[in-house]
Image: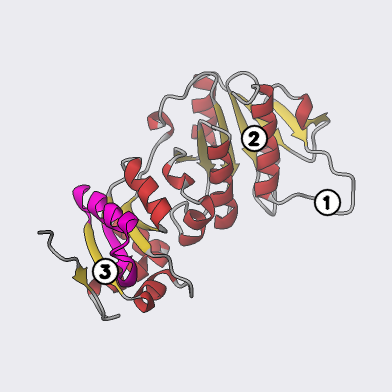
Amino acid sequence: MKQPLELITSPSNPLIKALKGLERKKERAESGLFLAEGARIVSEGLARGWQPETVIIAADMAERPQIRDLAGAAAKAGARVVMAPERLMTRITQKDNAQSVVAAFRQRHLTLETLPEPAPPPLYIALYEVRDPGNLGTILRTADCAGVSGVILIGTCCDPYSFEAVRASMGSVFDVPFAQASFDAFNTWRKGVGLSLSAASVNAGMRHDGADFTGGAILLMGNEQAGLPEWAEAACDTLCLIPMRGGADSLNLAQASAIMIYEAWRQRSYA
């Protein structure tokens, strides 16, 4: 007979406090953990081999077959699996409509050199000092949909393991490899592996669909407010412009990234 799951009911329980603390970057950095919400997304993390530390299940959902299977898989992977009432799930996630499953996973920190070997020709997207976690999560999701080889975070970027970024990624945080680096380290690396560098820029004379992304390529996108500095644009092989007819003078970073990513994918015949 299976051992019944531990039930936690007090908001002062150390586990509840620790999981709630993961809303803060300092706590995430010190613990090396981050939160993922929802049965489908947590199942994806388990299936992709990410290490679960704790899985907490809404007590009124624990007997559903899908949830029982997920709890078993998490326990097999070494997680502590517990139940809690909905009010505590809400406390952890700070959402009125809490998901039935919340999990704390171990973070992964890749370098440029430890990014997985991509299928040729590789296509990366690099984000220079992205500051909005919603944008970052959405770009991870778009990159996942289009089969991008990886995402490179350059300079001082927002935390890809924040609540907002993980939520916006809809599970793609588990699928898309990402690494962080300074611009100089990034530029040295990309030249060493023979990748072209193309940036979306208002200073470009070429339209984005006129650039050639069919070889090994990196698409470079700038900061939400300031775009790319002149010296970063000067390091690029190509600058390209996403056309706009007027009125609004710019696109949201996640939208612009999606346009660039899908143009590159179109040129590769959606392979």
- Return the mark for residue 83: 3
The three-letter code of the residue at mark 2 reads Ile
The residue under the point 90% across, 49% down is 246
The residue under the point 23% across, 52% down is 72
Q: Quadrant of residue 39?
A: bottom left
Is 59 within the magenta? yes
Q: Position of residue 179 (x, y in %)?
A: 45, 39
- Return the mark for residue 249: 1
Per the model, the C-alpha gap separating discs 2 and 1 is 21 Å
Which mark is first along the chain, 2 or 3? 3
Indicate the secondary structure of the residue bearing disc 2: helix
Is 144 within the magenta? no
The three-letter code of the residue at mark 3 reads Met
Magenta-tinted stretch: 54-79
Which mark is first along the chain, 1 or 2? 1
Which one is in front in this view, the residue at disc 3 or the one at disc 2? 3
The three-letter code of the residue at mark 1 reads Asp
Query: If the image is split into quadrants, where does the N terminus sit?
Result: bottom left
Q: Nearest the camera: 263 or 218?
A: 263
Vertical arrangement, residue 219 with respect to residue 89, above or below? above
Q: Nearest the camera: 16 or 96?
A: 96
Is residue 8 shown left or right of residue 151? left
On the image, numbered disc 2 is attached to which residue? 261
